[in-house]
Image: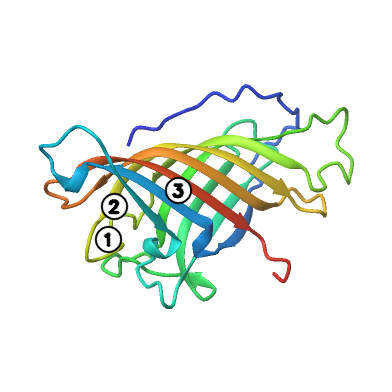
Amino acid sequence: MKRLFALCPLIFLTWATSSHAEFITMELPIENKDIDIVYYDLPDGNPNNFTGTDKKKLDGKDLLKDPKNNHLVLVVNYDRLKTADNITWTLEEWKGTAPFDRDSDKPDVESEIFKGNGRLFIKKRLHGEIKPNDLKNKKVTGTTNFEEGNAALLPFQTDTISLGGHQGSVSVTGKLDSASEGKIIQFKGNVTGTAFIGDPVANHQVTLTIKIKAKLKKSL
């Protein structure tokens, strides 16, 4: 799938170099109301009508295969020492404390709905050697791509549509933890992209805007 790259005209923060990745993994729960999806489709799904749009809205529960028992989790991997592509993320369906298999016909657990990877920066420039408290509560900003996950092609809203072939870009803002460990405890993503929708044999493309809000609960 073609990746979309975006340039970030941001002040670069110089980190100590590292010979290997030191990704920190965080699992951020998402409430259904914190996923806001708007897509623009052909009026009445009529493929012969190419003028005008039909605006439709969804939220987090519409992405879940089992909305009664499952919930959404944003899994974020972040490595502040990398000089390129230092963040990856996946939006997944979980049951309890583990990923939910949205496609039981495959040998591995297929829980991903959306995913992305890209570059994240500290918003405020730090001077000199990084001290223990320099990363405390710092805000971050950046851009990632936006693609379908390993289980994205399964239908949501089973009686109406199936969504797949996602691609686009995500502007990301977030916040690091209060212990200066470089952990992302808050992630906000604004997605602009496209997807294919409908019958896989005769599908058509729609435009998407998605707002994602994820925050680590204090009790975790």
Are discs 2 and 1 less than 8 Å apart at CB?
A: yes
65, above or below 131, in the image: below
Callout in the foreground (3, 1): 1
10 Å crowding of disc 3: few (<14), some (14-19), many (20+) = many
Say which residue label 1 marks: 155
Name the secondary structure under disc 3. Answer: strand
**Left or right of 134, for residue 60:** left
Mark number displayed over residue 49: none
Q: Amino acid at mark 2?
A: Leu
Callout in the foreground (3, 2): 2
**Left or right of 57, for residue 49:** left
Q: In this orientation, does residue 119 appear?
A: no
Mark number displayed over residue 115: 3
- Residue beneath the point at 28% across and 60% down: 154
- Residue beneath the point at 45% across and 46% down: 210
Are discs 3 and 1 less than 8 Å apart at CB?
A: no
Q: Rounded to the nearest whole Å, what is the CA distance between mark 3 and mark 1?
A: 17 Å
10 Å crowding of disc 1: few (<14), some (14-19), many (20+) = many
